[in-house]
Image (spheres, helix red, strand yellow):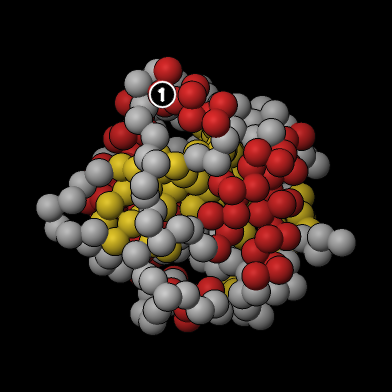
Amino acid sequence: MNRTRFHWILGENLPKHSALLEAVPGVGNVGKIVVDALIQKHPSTLIARLLHPDMPPHSTLDNDGLLTPPSMQVHQVILPDGQYLVTVSGNIQPMTAAGQNEVAEAILELAAEAETPQFLVLAGLSADVEDKDIHVICADVGVRRGLEAIDIPVSRNQPEAGMIGVAGLLISLSPLHNVPAVALVAETVGASADVIAANRLANWIEQAFELPLQLDLDSTEQTARKLLESVEVSGTIEDHLGLATESDDFYV
């Protein structure tokens, strides 16, 4: 039985949307900066909280001073051209492998029910300063063919070390739910909050998927500062996930 619960604040399922973007803290916090900047810059509404008993038992105060349980948050965002996005993000994810699998399955089931047309998982890959590529990764041959048909190259050799956590499971399990999930992984120097890589990723998404995110360096810098205030970014990958791995080449 899946122990994931959705606490719906608005409605009881996902509203109509052009794309779903998911991100959690990771290398450079690249994806998290993009998603948080979207929520802060454009009209957005918290529509649900995703709860799981394997999340760290740390309840926090919200903007109204009310104590909220550990969770990932689901927002609806309105872009400048009127398109709607759904974002799934948070400062934490379950600390166990079972919990991460259950959360990934629950999110994919929700996306499948809503017939999500584009499911984008945003992440970072540790690299040298001069490396600035965006790697596109998927788990379905049909999805890969569709991307390559519109001249979006799909990586076949990155990430060499694989993907761990909820993000990797969202991609690898997506074919089981017929969800067109794609990971967009920006190379980053791995700083606590790599604003430059986040801005580069946002611009890439705009061009490749025709989503007018309209984020800029100033907005991502502000988001990065807020992120560093709210997230403990020190420690290793294993510290954040409660897992052991032999490589730190890739983490989301």
Quarter that holds the C terminus: bottom left
Neighbours of disc 1 within 10 Å: few (<14), some (14-19), many (20+): few
Q: For this view, does 222 lie left or right of residue 104?
A: left
181 over 73 or under it: above or below: above
Q: For this view, does 125 lie left or right of residue 67?
A: left
Q: Quadrant of residue 30?
A: bottom left
Quick one: 33 or 43, which is closer to the camera? 33
* Circle 1: element type: helix
* Residue 230 position within the rendered picture, expressed as x and y whole percent measured from the top left: 44, 71
**Residue pictured at 70% horizontal, 67% vertical:** 99
**Residue pictured at 82% horizontal, 60% vertical:** 2
* Residue 39 position within the rendered picture, expressed as x and y whole percent measured from the top left: 48, 46
**Residue pictured at 39% horizontal, 71% vertical:** 247
* Residue 22 appears in view: yes
**Residue pictured at 36% horizontal, 27% vertical:** 152
Quick one: 26 or 77, which is closer to the camera? 26
* Residue 192 position within the rendered picture, expressed as x and y whole percent measured from the top left: 30, 68
Q: Quadrant of residue 26?
A: bottom left
Quarter that holds the N terminus: bottom right
Instruction: Give the farthest residue toward the top.
Output: 149
Q: Quadrant of residue 148?
A: top left
* Residue 41 appears in view: no
**Type of the residue with mark 1:** Glu
Name the residue tied to disc 1: 148
Quick one: 79 or 123, which is closer to the camera? 123
139 over 123 or under it: above or below: above
